[in-house]
Amino acid sequence: MSSLYNAIIIEDELPARRLLKELLAKYDRLVHISGEAAGGKDAIGLIHALRPGLLFLDIQLPDMLGLEVLRQLDYNPYVIFTTAYDEYAINAFDALSIDYLLKPLKEDRLARAIAKLEQFAAAGRPNSAWKNIDSLITGLRPQTGATTLAVKKGGKVTLVQMADIVYFEASDKYTFVHTANGQKLFCDHMLAVLEGKLPPDFIRVQKSYIVNRQKIVEIHKYSNNRFTLVLNNHEFTRIVTGPSYLPVIKTVFAV
């Protein structure tokens, strides 16, 4: 491959962006980093402005799925996904990417991805499955009306009954499921994704929390535009609602 690929790194974790740039330094004859973005909306604007030939794209961004970024594009750049979540990576990689890099990023895995990039480009191989991107996004989201949710528990994936979930919590980049029996389980879905796909009993009450309204035992006024919700779990967890969610809280709970 004789041409130099302009590339954009789309990754919300600054240390991961720095590490990837360091690892890519030895491939500067092939890849030139022309921009960076920490979120999906910024990435879309940057891609439209620079039209890079290659994206290093995190599958799970703070404001949207990486696949949703791709859906907004009017051309098909090559993609190397970065992800902490192996299930996401396999689904997306099989469909429309050159390769995927699991975090923490490793030099040997990047070398393999760059080698595959050269092979794709030399063969003029298109990303033929881009037309299926909507179905891929749907496949990465939980479905409305589902009675169970797949979560990680140790080294395996298990199904948790929706009725047993007390609340979802976003912490840094990760999402956790808290159950009625006190379990705290890792969930692969962002709150923004869950919010539109969970059954109606689950209400977004704050930037970092979605709660099961059936698990609320008390509601107390916290301030003029906030309430404290007491949940029916072992710890009787108390969650203060966010001011921007006040209209939803008043409508749902008639307070």
Image: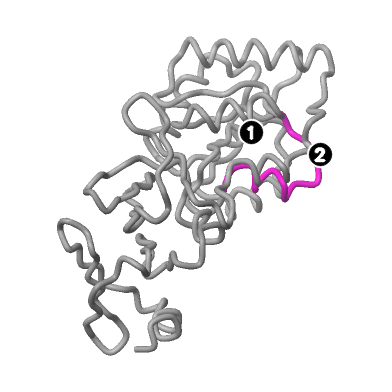
Q: CA distance from mark 1 to mark 2?
A: 18 Å
Q: Quadrant of the N terminus?
A: top right
Residue 225 in the figure: left or right of residue 56: left
Other residues around mark 1 within 10 Å, as few (<14) / some (14–19) / many (≥20): many
Residue kind at label 2, given as amino acid type: Lys
Looking at the image, residue 23 lies above or below residue 85? above
At horizontal 39% and vertical 56% (from top left) the residue drawn is 163
Question: Any magenta on residue 198?
Answer: no
Looking at the image, residue 96 lies above or below residue 240? above
Give percent across and percent down for residue 47. Answer: 68, 45
Q: Quadrant of residue 249?
A: bottom left
Give percent across and percent down for residue 219. Answer: 25, 79
Other residues around mark 2 within 10 Å, as few (<14) / some (14–19) / many (≥20): few
Q: Quadrant of the C terminus?
A: bottom left
Residue nearer the viewer, 165 or 25: 165
- Looking at the rendered structure, which numbered label has been put on residue 131? 2
Q: Quadrant of residue 52?
A: top right
Lower position in the chain sequence, tag 1 or tag 2: 1
Q: Are marks 1 and 2 in contact (CB under 8 Å)?
A: no
Q: How many marks?
A: 2
- Circle nearer the viewer, 1 or 2: 2
Residue nearer the viewer, 102 or 118: 102
Identify the secondary structure beneath mark 1.
Answer: strand
Identify the secondary structure beneath mark 2.
Answer: helix
At horizontal 76% and vertical 16% (from top left) the residue drawn is 120
Q: Magenta segment range?
A: 65-78
At horizontal 43% and vertical 68% (from top left) the residue drawn is 203
At horizontal 50% and vertical 55% (from top left) the residue drawn is 194
- Looking at the rendered structure, which numbered label has been put on residue 55? 1
